[in-house]
Image: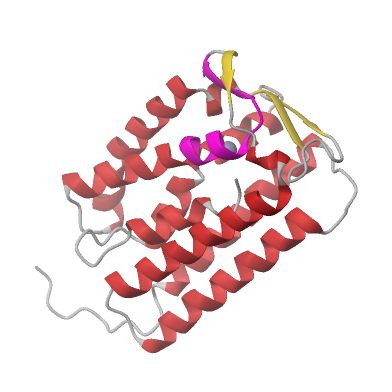
Amino acid sequence: MFVGHYSVAFAARTEKNKIPLWVLFVAVQFLDYIWATLVLLGIEKLRVIKDFTAGSMLDSYFHPYSHSLITAIAWSVLAALVYKPLCSWLGYTYTKSAALIVGVAVFSHWILDLIAHPRDLPIYDNTWKVGFGLWNYRAPEFALEIALLAGGIILYLTRNLMPASRKVAAIVFGVGLTIIQIGDTYVPREALTDKATAMGVWIFYTLFVVIGFFLEKMGRRRQTNPS
Ligand SMILES: [Zn+2]
């Protein structure tokens, strides 16, 4: 799963919980941030193999710290706990329910990966591996990613008050993610090294986080009533 993860971020953001979109963008890819970092450090192992599955070249044969069920739960709890100090540091509205949503957003990554990945997600450590393997079916996997993303963006647009400019920007960003997913799924390319792939994950995901940050700055009036 790639751009489909962002559907959860878009869907989770409401006028009521006021969780910044960029925070949710980090949350839904939190496990992959840890994964990419550990691959760069040589702790988790990845082989990039052309045509490994129809929809992905990634053979993540050792990623027990970022992608086992047990550690995914632990990272989700940690993210929910870290949300409070993050809010007080950056002056965001904090509620317990918002922290819970951030935790669930982190965990959603594992559930969506479970659908797409071949049997490479361990329950704990590096054993009892699961994965429904939708990546073996290129078109259905692609369709699911895009359907999820579209659904998430529609929820974001309907459940949040925002100026027209931001609505357009959110749709343009969705189209951009769709194009990136088309490139990732359908455009033939040579396999990168494991480290270059992990670097690419960091760069692209962080670019999306920056876009999420500026998206919510669009058309925003300066707050004049501190509460
Ligand atoms: Zn993942």
Ligand 1 positioned in quadrant: top right
Question: Which sits in the foreground, 86 or 55?
Answer: 55
In the drawing, does residue 77 fall left or right of residue 95? right
- What residue is drawn where x is 43% and y is 20%? 70
- What residue is drawn where x is 55% and y is 70%? 174
Residue 44, placed above or below residue 31? above
In the drawing, does residue 175 fall left or right of residue 184? left
Instruction: Residue 69 in the image: state x and y as whole percent.
Output: 46, 23
Most extreme residue toward the left is 227
In the drawing, does residue 12 fall left or right of residue 132? left
Residue 84 in sight here: no
- In which quadrant will I find the N terminus? top right
Q: In which quarter of the image is residue 103?
A: top left
Instruction: Residue 31 in the image: state x and y as whole percent.
Output: 52, 36
Per the image, is 122 magenta? Answer: yes
- What residue is drawn where x is 47% and y is 74%? 170
Residue 61, placed above or below residue 87? above
Instruction: Residue 23 in the image: state x and y as whole percent.
Output: 40, 54
Instruction: Residue 97 in the image: state x and y as whole percent.
Output: 19, 46
Q: What stretch is highlighted in magenta?
A: 110-124
Q: In which quarter of the image is residue 187?
A: bottom right
Per the image, is 4 magenta? Answer: no
Question: Which sits in the foreground, 118 or 207?
Answer: 118
